Amino acid sequence: MNNPLSKVPETKQEVVRRKTRQEYAAQTALLKRRGDYLPQYDYFLDILSLRAEPEKFRQKINRPVAALNCLQAPLEIFHALGFVPYRFCSSTVSGQDVAASRLPALACPVIKSALSSFLLEDSIESLADLTVIAGTCDWMVRFPELLEAHGGKIHFMELPHMKESERGRKRWIEEIFLLKEFLEKESGKMMSRSKLRLSLEKYAAARLSLRKLLEARERKEIPALWCMIMTNALMMGDVEGWTHSVNEVVQVQSGKLCCPEASVFLAGSPVMFPNLKIPQLLEDAGIHVAADELCTSERILAGVPLAEDNSEFALLKALAEQSHLGCSCPTYADNERRLDNIMATMRDRNISGLVLHILKGCHPYDLCSFQMEQVLRENGFHFLRIETDQSREDSKSLLLRLEAFSAVIQ
C-alpha cells in the first residue's frame, strides 16, 4: 500500500534546478569566506546568482530579455530598443545533463550548458523574449537547429570570417542593420537617434569603468578572480548600476596591493561564473592574471565606437566596426594581429608567460594553440597550454603544472 505522505520523486528537470542552485550558492559562499572579500562585491554576486533564480531575475529587470551568445552583437542597440542583453552561454556542471542526449560526447562544455539552459523549464533562457545567435564557431552555427524545439524567436547573425577585408566589414554592417530591423519588429517601435546616443553614452561610461578596473588589476590592487566575477556580471541587466559598483570597488582598493608576484597573460576559452576553476587554480599556484583576452573579461567591451557624424547610419556603422575589428576571437581566418597585440601587451606590462586555457571541444582555440606556442617561444615568452572541462577532477594535476610554470616565470 502506498504511503500518501511518501516523498514524490524529483523529475530530471527538478534535480537539475536544485543542483544548479546549490552550485551557485556554494560558489558564492566560498567567495564570501575569502580574506579579500569586500561588501562591495555583493552587488556582482547577487546579480550573478539570479541565473539560478529566473523569476527573481525577471522581477528585478522588468524589461524584455534578449538572450545572445556573442559580444559582436552591439549591446547598445539592444539597450536603445528597451531590451536587456543577456549572455546565455553558461558554465554550470550540473546543468549540462539536460542536453547530454542531444549532443556529441565531446561537445564544447559551453554549448552543453547553454543548450541545457534553453531546454530547462523556467530558466532565464527559456523565458527570454528572443534569442540572437552569432555564428562564431561550428557549434554556434548549428545552435539554431538545436533550438528548433524550443520554439522561441531566433535571429541568426552570419559572421564574416575575413575580418580585415572591405567585403567582410561591409557584410557585418549589413548584419548590424538586419539586427536593428529584427529588434525593432519585435519591440514594436523604431529606434530613435536620441535613444541610441543615450545608450552609447551609458556604455561609454561602462568602458571607462572597465578600463579603470583593468588598470587596478594590472597594479595588483584587485585580484584577477574578483575582476572576472565583476566583468561576468555586466550582461545581467543594469549597465548603470554595474558601472557605479565597479567604480566603488576600484576606489576602495586604490593603493592596496593584494596579489601574488608572478604575472601571466591568460588567453583562450571563456571563464564563466560559477565555474571559476581556472582563476582559482592560478591563484593557488601563486600566479596573478595581469592581462587577458577572454571575451568574459578584458574583451567584454570593445573600444569606443568612433562615428563620422551623428546620423543613425554613422552611429550603427561605428558600432559595427568597433565590435568587428575590436574582436580577437580565433574564429577569424585573418587574425594575424592577434598575436602581435598579445605580445605587445606582454612587453608593455612586463609579463613573461602566457597560459592558454582551452575547453575540450573548443576547436578554434585548440587549432590556434600550435601557432601561438611557436610564435611566443620564438619571441622569448614562456607558454603553458591547459586543456580542461568544467569538472574538478583534474584540479590537482593542473595545479602541479601551474606551480611548475610559476617557478619558471618568477
Image: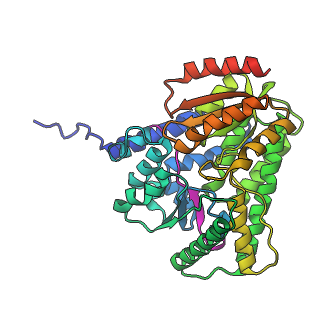
| Number of numbered discs overlaid on the protein picture | 0
- The quarter of the picture where residue 61 lies is bottom right
Foreground residue among 121 and 196: 196
Q: Residue at x 55, y 23 (%)?
A: 395
State which region is magenta.
Answer: 80-93
Q: In which quarter of the image is the N terminus?
A: top left
Magenta: main secondary structure:
loop
Direction right: furthest residue: 255
Colour basis: rainbow
Foreground residue among 283 and 310: 310
Relative height, residue 161 to residue 154 (above, below): above
Residue 89 on the magenta span:
yes
Point out residue 160 in the picture as x, y percentages from the top left corner.
59, 62
- The answer to whether residue 189 of the structure is visible from this angle is yes
Point out residue 166 in the picture as x, y percentages from the top left corner.
69, 67
Relative height, residue 91 to residue 132 (above, below): above
Relative side of 124 to 328, left or right: left
Q: Which residue is drawn at 50% across and 36% down?
A: 360
Q: In which quarter of the image is the C terminus?
A: top right
Point out residue 23 in the picture as x, y percentages from the top left corner.
50, 37
Q: Which residue is drawn at 68% across and 50% down?
A: 335
Foreground residue among 40 and 191: 191
Point out residue 87 in the picture as x, y percentages from the top left corner.
57, 55
Relative height, residue 224 to residue 208 (above, below): above
Residue 176 on the magenta span:
no
- The answer to whether residue 36 of the structure is visible from this angle is no
